């Protein structure tokens, strides 16, 4: 029988006894949980540049990109998305990285 006499030894023994899945938090640093990657972000349209294929949004956090709220321009995956909005519209959107740029992949009126 092994005797553990120090708190460190007890802690070490507990960690060894736990399965690997219990030792890891299940969330890697910098990686978004699967549910968050599918979530929409909220925003307000600040500028629509149809010629440039860009939209400027004042947005809240974008969990799928690990990004906090700010105002910034995005490219759009489908230029037809820009026909659906005007400055001042409240929207919900999804964004992703594509070719080193951030692009809006889905855009809908806020509910």
Image (spheres, rainbow, N blue to C red):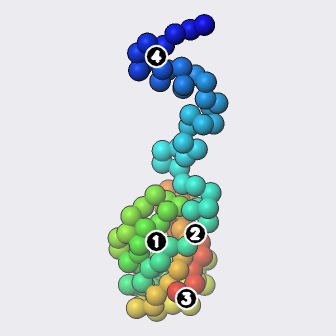
Tell me which numbered mark, 1 or 4, is placed earlier along the sequence.
4
Residue position marked by numbered label 2 in the rendering: 39
Residue 2 position in % (x across, y down): 56, 8
Q: CA distance from mark 1 to mark 2?
A: 17 Å
Q: Earlier in the sequence, mark 1 or mark 2?
A: 2
Residue picked out by circle 3: 111
Q: Nearer the viewer, residue 107 or 101?
A: 107
Give the residue at x 55% y 46%. 27
Q: Nearer the viewer, residue 86 or 110?
A: 110
Rounded to the nearest whole Å, what is the CA distance between mark 1 and mark 3? 22 Å
Residues at discs 1 and 4 in contact (Cβ within 8 Å)? no
Earlier in the chain: of badge 3 and badge 2, it is 2
Residue 9, placed above or below residue 58: above
Q: Position of residue 13 (x, y in %)?
A: 54, 20
Q: Residue placed at 58% from the left, 69% from the top?
A: 39
- N-terminal label among 1 and 3: 1
Q: Secondary structure at mark 4?
A: helix
Tag 4 residue: 9
Query: SS class of the residue under badge 3?
Result: loop
Question: In the image, residue 101 lies at what x, y percent?
Answer: 49, 61
Q: Is residue 88 above or below residue 43?
A: below
- Residue 7 position, x and y percent, is 41, 20
Q: Is residue 69 above or below residue 24?
A: below
Image quarter for residue 73? bottom left
Q: Which residue is mark 1?
A: 74
Q: Earlier in the sequence, mark 3 or mark 4?
A: 4
């Amino acid at each position: 029988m092994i005797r553990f006499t120090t708190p460190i030894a007890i802690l070490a023994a507990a960690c060894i006894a736990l399965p690997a899945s219990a030792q890891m938090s299940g969330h890697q640093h910098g990686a978004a949980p699967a549910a968050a990657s599918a979530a929409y972000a909220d925003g307000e349209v600040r500028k629509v540049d149809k010629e440039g294929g860009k939209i400027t949004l004042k947005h809240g956090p974008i969990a799928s990109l690990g990004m906090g709220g700010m105002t910034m321009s995005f490219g759009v995956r489908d230029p037809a998305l820009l026909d659906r909005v005007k400055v001042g519209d409240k929207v919900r959107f999804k964004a992703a990285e594509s070719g080193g740029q951030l692009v809006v992949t889905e855009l809908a009126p806020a509910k």
